[in-house]
Each structure stands twice: as C-alpha cells, then as structure tokens.
Image (cartoon, grey):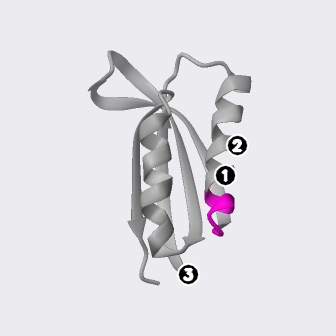
Amino acid sequence: MRDYELVIIVTPEFEEEATADIVEKVKSWITDTGGSIESFEEWGRQKLAYLVRKNKEGQYYLFNLKLEPTAVDGVERNFGLQEAIMRFLIIGRDD
C-alpha cells in the first residue's frame, strides 16, 4: 500500500445532499479497491483560477488515503465517468 493525496472539485450546481452522495461514491470506490481513507477534509466552495465547464467556482475535497498502485487507474477511470466531478488530482506521497 502506498500513501496518496486526492483532491476533487465538484460542480457547484449540486445541493449539499447530492454533493454528499458524490463524496460517498468516491469513498466507496477507494474502499472497494482495497484502499483506506486516512483523513478527509471539506475545503468548501472556492473560486477557480479559470473557467471549468462554464463554472467560476467549485467545491473542493481533500482525501489522504492508502491504496495499491495498481488500483489507481481504476479509481481514476471512475472519476472520468462521473460528470459531477469537474477536476481531480491524485498524487503519491513520500513521507
């Protein structure tokens, strides 16, 4: 298992309940592949540096997680299929 940081930006058009469902989906994708979530932070609504899908803002979330390197591609594929996630970045951590 390797340590990763994951940041997702969710479309601001969704209400709190719908956004919570999306976050739960992300958590389940990670745990279904054998990973674990070490910590989770909701950064809230932030202004974007440039327009993304005609949006000036996004809802940011940070996950610190442990995941097998072979499972990263599958998790990233799920992000690409989820329309509500505007952007994501997953990077390995060397602590």
Q: Residue at x 42, y 59 (%)?
A: 73
SS assignment at label 2: helix
9 magenta-colored:
no
Name which residue lies at 41% across and 40% down: 80
> Amino acid under label 1?
Lys
Q: Which residue is mark 3?
A: 1
Q: Find residue 30 and report its horizontal and vertical position in percent.
A: 62, 58
Q: Which mark is residue 24?
A: 2
Secondary element under disc 3, as helix, strand or loop, is: loop
> Mark 3, residues whose alpha carbon is within 10 Å: few (<14), some, or many (≥20)?
few
Q: Residue furthest left?
A: 50
Residue 84 at x, y = what percent?
A: 51, 28
Looking at numbered disc 3 in the image, what kind of residue is underneath it? Answer: Met
- The question of residue 34 being in magenta is answered with yes
Q: CA distance from mark 2 to mark 3?
A: 22 Å
Q: Residue at x 63, y 68 (%)?
A: 35
Disc number placed over residue 27 in the picture, else none = 1
Q: Earlier in the sequence, mark 2 or mark 3?
A: 3
